[in-house]
Image: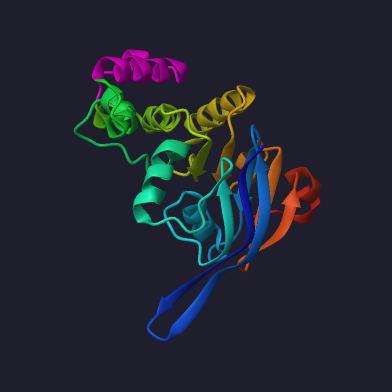
Amino acid sequence: MDVISVQNLHHTYRSGSLKVPALKGIDFAIPEGQMAAIMGPSGSGKSTLLHVLGCLMHVVEGSYRLAGHDVTHLGDDALADVRGRQIGFVFQSYNLVPQLTALENVELPLVYRGTPGRERRRIALTMLEQVGLADRAGHRPSELSGGQQQRVGIARAMVGEPAVILADEPTGNLDTASGQAILDLFRALHHQGRTIVIVTHAPEVAGLCERTIRIRDGQVADDGPLERRANGGIRG
């Protein structure tokens, strides 16, 4: 089954009478269990594409199916519900709530779903164990390293068993060692069968993925294994 399927996807930004096209007929599908990278230079449209895939932005033209459901014409409330149940987000800046502990941050998506307290705590602690941070459950973000904060972010993304994990430059704020640890974690999640889409500038991140979708000027410029373009001087 295709977890993500977009066809003839367009998006245009408007500023007064000015129209700026950002996406110009994007077509691709990502099957269940695939780990894919989206790459492209600044201004290529990849951030807009991520927002559409994450149900943070409406489709202007074309169609988008997520986990078998057509989300193209959903309103804001329905999109928010889909976003909360079907998508796990991992952010470059972690986006943890500073006043909450690691465990409480991971619990948040389950709080919004109305999961009972004891059950959500059990599930969240299991997720922290999977990312190797069970012993940091009671620590707040300021008491954690950048790599540990990102692990909490990944645990939070996984806690609701979403159809897809969307990661936006997940190693961008990390040193080499911490970044590699996060990439190793994504690789392990992929081997568990999770569907993962990573937006990145870094070829070493895309190199972990079985597929790289290259965006340029709002269109898919190339789609396939990164290795096939290795001699072409890929630059993020």
**Magenta extent:** 117-139
Question: Foreground residue, 180 or 157?
Answer: 157
Residue 84 at what x, y percent from top left? 39, 40
Q: Write the residue at 24% across / 19% down.
A: 117
Percent x, y for residue 137?
A: 30, 18
Quadrant of the rendering where the C terminus is positioned: bottom right
Q: Residue at x 37, y 39 (%)?
A: 94
Q: Residue furthest bottom?
A: 17
Residue at (80, 51) in percent of width and height: 231
Q: Quadrant of the N terminus?
A: top right
Front position in the image: 217 or 231: 217
Tell how many labels: 0
Residue 18, percent from left and from top: 45, 84
Q: Main secondary structure of the magenta part?
A: helix
Specify whether residue 71 is in view. Answer: yes
Above or below, 229 against 208 in this view is below
Q: How is the image coloured?
A: rainbow
Tell me: 36 left or right of 110: right
Q: Is residue 146 magenta?
A: no
* Quarter of the image where one finds residue 109: top left
The residue lying furthest to the left in this view is 99
- Expressed as whole percent of the image width and height from the top left, the position of residue 223 reads 73, 52
Q: Quadrant of residue 203?
A: top right
- The answer to whether one can see residue 200 in this image is no
Q: Out of 113 and 15, give the one closest to the viewer.
A: 113
Residue 196, by quadrant, is top right
* Residue for point 78% across, 55% down: 232
Foreground of the two, 113 or 231: 113
